[in-house]
Image (cartoon, rainbow, N blue to C red):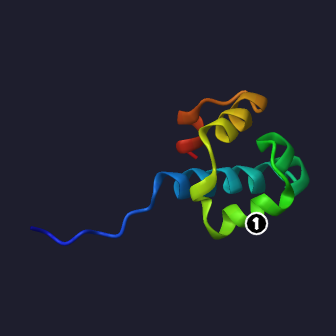
Amino acid sequence: MASKAHRITLYKKLWCKIRYWQSLQDVSDEELAGYLQVGERTLREYDKSAKHITLEKIDNFLSINKMELNELLSM
């Protein structure tokens, strides 16, 4: 059996795309926290490990920004 290649988890990929979008849009951490309905401290926790980000938070972000998931993932 072939050895497992290191893969990027879905939650890490989504979080990186959100942070990338943030930099492109010049959105502050305060604004981003509002879009996700979390505190700024939680953003820093997601930077360390995004495994606790929920689909609800991602959906809030997408809804507020009138985006579809495929748009975010294609960035």
Residue 63: x and y in percent read: 72, 28
Q: In which quarter of the image is the N terminus?
A: bottom left
Q: Name the residue under label 1.
A: 44
Residue drawn 60% across the image and 39% down it: 55
Residue 21: x and y in percent read: 70, 49
The quadrant in which residue 19 appears is: bottom right
- 28 up-or-down from 49: above or below: above
- 1 up-or-down from 18: above or below: below
Q: Is residue 16 left or right of residue 21?
A: left
Task: Report helix, strand or loop for mark 1.
Answer: helix
Residue 74: x and y in percent read: 53, 43
Residue toward you, 62 or 53: 53
Q: Residue furthest toward the left?
A: 1
- 35 up-or-down from 33: above or below: above
Residue 14: x and y in percent read: 57, 50
Q: Is residue 68 left or right of residue 6?
A: right
Residue drawn 54% across the image and 43% down it: 73
Residue toward you, 3 or 65: 3
Q: In this view, does 31 lie to the left or right of 23?
A: right
Residue drawn 66% across the image and 33% down it: 59
How many marks can you see? 1
Residue drawn 53% across the image and 34% down it: 70
Circle 1 crowding by C-alpha within 10 Å: few under 14, some 14–19, many from 20: few
The quadrant in which residue 60 appears is: top right
User: Which amino acid type is marked by label 1?
Assistant: Arg
Q: Residue furthest toward the front?
A: 52
Residue toward you, 33 or 65: 33
